Image (tube, grey):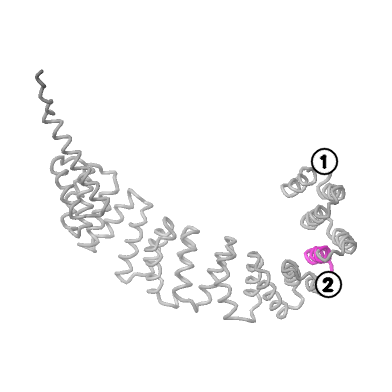
Amino acid sequence: MTLAAPAQPDPASRAAALDATGREAALDATELHDWPRAAALWAEQASAQPRDFEAQLRLAEALFFAARPAEAVAPAKLAARLRPKEARPLLVLARAATALEPAAAPAAWRAVLALAPRSFEAWARLAELQLAQGRAATALEPLARALGVQPDHPFGLALAGRVLGALPARQRQDRLNQAVAAATPDAGLALRHVAAQVEPLDMRAQAALAQALLARQAHAQALAPLRALVQASPNAPEPLAQLARCLHHTAAWPAAARNWRRLLRLRPQDAEAGQHLAEALRHDNQAEAALRVAQQALGHAQGHAGLLREHALCLAALGRHAEANTAWATALAAHPHDSALHLEQVAYLLRQHRHAEALAALERRVGPSAGYDRASLLLLRQLQR
């Protein structure tokens, strides 16, 4: 039997297979950042298919990253003509302009932004170019726009440090405030962080950072700038109160108690400090000390809702339930519409397994036919189990 010779692929199919193999090799070299090899392989692809947008763009990128920016311009321009609404060729042209002709680079980067207004690189490079020209104050606006896109980008944060460091110290805070006011919240916070690092002894920068973090309820992060403020002004009550509140929110009870005590030494009749000191001590398993603090604070802040609540909770923590019941009654008589008091009492009754009393107290708070809020519903579900 005679075997037939295997069929040979036609020339067009063979050329297509070779082309696919070459393209795969070019993509592999690009992925490996082997830029000289990638440039050579993409040059073959672009030569074979001059109107292949991807080949021209990849060739331009490979040439630029192979430290051949002048050679990257021609294929990038060709790719831009093939797809006028595509930003990537303009990105290569802007990079090449930055390397070859810095005076023309701002216009090139703005051309990128016209098509890609959220390009981090374009905004950051504009800021960097303005900084290089000695225009640090002007650089703040594109810098803030870059951080608005990627607020935690290492290059953006490092550039922010350079820009802020280049501003005259006497102008820095005012310029920064203007930039933050116009920036996104994330970018503004990033700028506040960098400003506090650039000048750690500038208490205005520390205070602004602390306030920005507190506005986001980022209590743990706010501790560092607040500690700096307290260390700089140990007898200033407001930073101390804010530090104590943050420690309280993070359940750092011993540290919170220490700072509430320090505040009480500055403001002996501060009812909030007395209430929170008692609460911190109670959470730190010092119920006797907490009760003494609550009773002492009530001596000069009679009727304070928070202190009355804490007084009842301290008695309950000590197992003095008859006195706790009296304390709850006194507190609720003084503040019949205080939701926090009602809910704390209901929670206390639930812990005592006094479900009927808890349900009655809950209904007294909202009324038997009224709509229940979320907190009341959660407690009601516990009662119904």
Task: Give the image quarter of residue 97.
Answer: bottom left
Q: Which residue is mark 2?
A: 295
Classify 10 Å Cα crowding around label 2: few (below 14), some (14-19), many (20 and above).
some
First reached walking from the N terminus: tag 1 or tag 2: 2
Task: Give the image quarter of residue 85.
Answer: top left
Q: Is residue 280 left or right of residue 365?
A: left
Residue at the spot 34% in from the left edge and 49% down from the top edge = 116
Q: Which residue is mark 1?
A: 369
Which one is in front, 224 or 146? 224
Note whether 231 is above or below 323 in the view shown: below
Residue at the spot 17% in from the left edge and 39% down from the top edge = 19
Say which element carries label 1: loop
Q: Is residue 351 left or right of residue 102?
A: right
Residue at the spot 32% in from the left edge and 61% down from the top edge = 125
Q: Position of residue 41 (x, y in %)?
A: 17, 48
Q: Is residue 51 left or right of residue 351?
A: left
The segment highlighted magenta reads: 300-316
Q: Position of residue 256 (x, y in %)?
A: 67, 71
Tell me which amino acid carries mark 2: Gln
